[in-house]
């Protein structure tokens, strides 16, 4: 007799699982960057257009497929058509690739969390050199936060070819990250359903605390004005619309099979339409909320750096020209500089190379995303706060909750098709299957803890999922609308939720969403061709800058 399928305890648990999966690190470190790059508040226009055209319809489609077929991605698409089995396999493979490197971020979060209990924070100042006669030269050439990230955390190799050895501290943190994930997924929905209450709600508590603290920081208003000032000319920039569509697509986690897996544990009568709308709106609202927090912190950091720069210039001019202390201020600095340049041209010319051009706008224009924002920019802002250890613990705990929540979805996309397989399920218990998946991923993931691991992380992050996910979701929409049949799908939805989908959903599924995905696919292919192969600038011999990837 076939065992009954496990179910979520209640519909709220399912919604929390979807929110925990969808609301991830991209909401914190990707969306604020896009706002900064593409018109501040003006970016919200293409963002919400793409949410309506692409985000909600595709999320609804995946949830409906999982709930109707009551299988993981492989079984669901095989039920629709035996020829579509490969779509499910592709989703599992992409989720496996993502899991291999994504949990490394949780390992880094653990590393920073453990160091957050030190007073002072280890990235607050440069360490002493081996002779204890001064500071580390590499740190002085960069900054304490960059040094702690690239040297103490990654111990990054000078090039991709110089793979270096395994960093045992990072390897232990990665092992711990995978152990936590394993304990969360050990008994399927029974254990995951309890964990998602924490992983979905705790980040909001931390964001609220940071919002209150951020709004009281000196200079926070500068960041908020920068964010909410719309630059409507960016609406004519096609990349703004492409970036909005891409952010919606990847933020909701479409194509991985995680949403199909989660929905397969629903009651057949669950209102997946309502849940698709709720999850997508909460996900987008969280992105905006996180941006307000980020830009308040960003404004504080930019103002702090700007005022520090001004004070250094004032000190240099005061000492060089023996000015009366307090006579030179930020308000009269430009006028005094002009006077000194005219009155003492030779002396001023000699001092000029040391005088930095301080600009608050330039500080705010510095666009950072990804690990650079999460582990460098935020760390730099935190170290300048009062009770910095407390805010550091809160911040990296939030990153952990966001990362673990996403990992629960990634692993569900792999495990659900495996546990659905009668052959595997009869030979191995669920706990063993979960353990093997975690162990294999952990062993492969050790590659990313080597000295050259961050290079591989960037390569996987850029190439492991982008085009493949677009192709997977395109095939999904075409399969449902034209292979399975939209009228047949309508009847299924009527049976499940009590009414047929409106014309809006049908138009989006059949025409608008597929055309948008094809446009994105063409854009990315063209972009790869025109911009050339991926290359990178390695560390220079004197380590005056750290490696970065580019195309040539």
Image: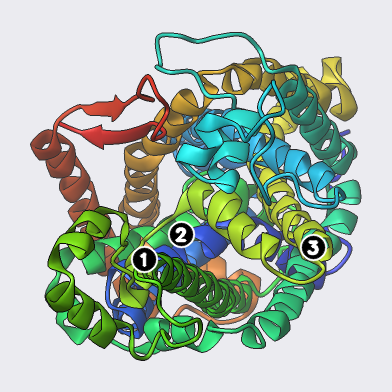
* Residue 454, position as x, y percentages in the image: 51, 28
Residue 196 visible, this orientation? yes
The C terminus sits in image quarter:
top left
Q: Viewer-nearest of labels 1 and 3?
A: 3
Contact flag, marks 2 and 1 (Cβ < 8 Å) = yes
- Horizontal side of 397 relative to 43 (left or right) equals right
Report which residue position mark 3 lands on: 394
Gap between marks 2 and 3 measured at Cα? 20 Å
**1 and 3 marks in contact (CB < 8 Å):** no
Q: Give the distance between the C-alpha atoms of the residues marked 2 and 1, in whole angstroms.
A: 6 Å
Q: Is residue 213 left or right of residue 236?
A: right
Q: 454 or 201: nearer the eye?
A: 454
- The residue at 67%/47% (across/down) is 123
Q: Where's residue 129, x and y in %?
A: 66, 27
Q: Give coordinates of residue 435: x percent, y percent.
A: 82, 24
Q: Which residue is mark 2?
A: 30
Residue at image location 34% in from the left, 79% down from the top: 40
Q: Name the residue that disc number 1 marks.
A: 34
User: Considering the image in quadrants, where does the N terminus appear?
Assistant: top right
From mark 1 to mark 3, how far is it between C-alphas? 25 Å
Q: Is residue 434 above or below residue 238?
A: above
Relative horizontal placement of residue 455, taking residue 301 as reference (left or right): left
Indicate which disc, 1 or 3, sits on the residue closer to the N terminus: 1
Q: Is residue 267 visible?
A: no
């Amino acid at each position: 007799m076939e065992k009954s399928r496990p179910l979520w305890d209640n519909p709220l648990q399912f919604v929390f699982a979807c929110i925990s999966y969808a609301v991830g690190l991209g909401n914190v470190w990707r969306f604020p960057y896009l706002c900064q790059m593409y018109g501040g508040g003006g970016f919200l226009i293409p963002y919400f257009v793409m949410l309506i055209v692409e985000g909600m319809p595709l999320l609804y489609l995946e949830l409906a497929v999982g709930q109707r077929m009551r299988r993981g991605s492989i079984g669901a698409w095989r039920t629709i058509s035996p020829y579509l089995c490969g779509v499910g396999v592709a989703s599992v493979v992409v989720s496996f690739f993502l899991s291999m490197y994504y949990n490394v971020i949780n390992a880094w979060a653990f590393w920073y969390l453990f160091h957050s209990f030190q007073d002072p924070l280890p990235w607050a100042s440069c360490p002493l050199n081996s002779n204890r006669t001064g500071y580390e030269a590499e740190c002085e050439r960069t900054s304490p936060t960059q040094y702690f990230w690239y040297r103490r955390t990654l111990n990054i190799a000078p090039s991709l070819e110089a793979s270096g050895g395994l960093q045992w501290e990072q390897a232990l943190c990665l092992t711990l990250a995978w152990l936590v994930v394993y304990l969360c997924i050990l008994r399927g929905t029974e254990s995951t359903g309890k964990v998602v209450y924490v992983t979905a709600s705790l980040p909001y508590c931390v964001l609220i605390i940071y919002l209150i603290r951020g709004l009281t920081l000196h200079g926070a208003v500068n960041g908020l004005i920068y964010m909410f000032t719309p630059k409507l000319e960016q609406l004519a920039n096609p990349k703004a619309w492409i970036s909005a569509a891409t952010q919606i697509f990847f933020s909701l986690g479409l194509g991985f099979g995680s949403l199909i897996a989660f929905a397969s544990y629903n009651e057949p009568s669950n209102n997946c339409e309502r849940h698709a709308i709720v999850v997508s709106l909460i996900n987008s609202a969280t992105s905006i909320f996180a941006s307000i927090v980020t830009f308040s912190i960003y404004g504080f950091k930019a103002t702090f750096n700007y005022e520090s720069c001004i004070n250094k210039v004032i000190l240099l001019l005061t000492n060089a020209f023996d000015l009366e202390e307090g006579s030179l201020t930020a308000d009269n600095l430009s006028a005094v500089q002009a006077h000194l340049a005219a009155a003492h041209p030779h002396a001023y010319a000699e001092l000029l190379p040391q005088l930095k051009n301080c600009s608050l706008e330039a500080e705010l224009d510095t666009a950072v995303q990804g690990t650079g924002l999460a582990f460098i920019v935020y760390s730099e802002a935190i170290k300048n706060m009062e009770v910095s250890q407390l805010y550091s613990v809160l911040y990296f705990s939030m990153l952990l909750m966001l990362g673990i929540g996403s990992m629960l979805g990634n692993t569900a996309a792999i495990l659900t098709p495996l546990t659905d397989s009668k052959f595997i399920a009869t030979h191995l218990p669920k706990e063993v299957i979960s353990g093997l998946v975690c162990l294999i991923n952990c062993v492969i993931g050790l590659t990313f803890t080597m000295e050259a691991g961050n290079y591989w992380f960037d390569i996987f992050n850029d190439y492991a999922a982008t085009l493949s996910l677009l192709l997977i979701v395109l095939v999904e929409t075409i399969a449902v609308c034209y292979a399975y049949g939209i009228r047949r799908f309508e009847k299924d939805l009527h049976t499940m939720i009590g009414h047929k989908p409106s014309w809006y959903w049908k138009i989006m599924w059949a025409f608008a969403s597929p055309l948008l995905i094809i446009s994105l696919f063409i854009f990315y292919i063209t972009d790869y061709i025109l911009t050339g192969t991926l290359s990178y600038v390695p560390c220079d011999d004197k380590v005056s800058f750290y490696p970065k990837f580019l195309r040539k």
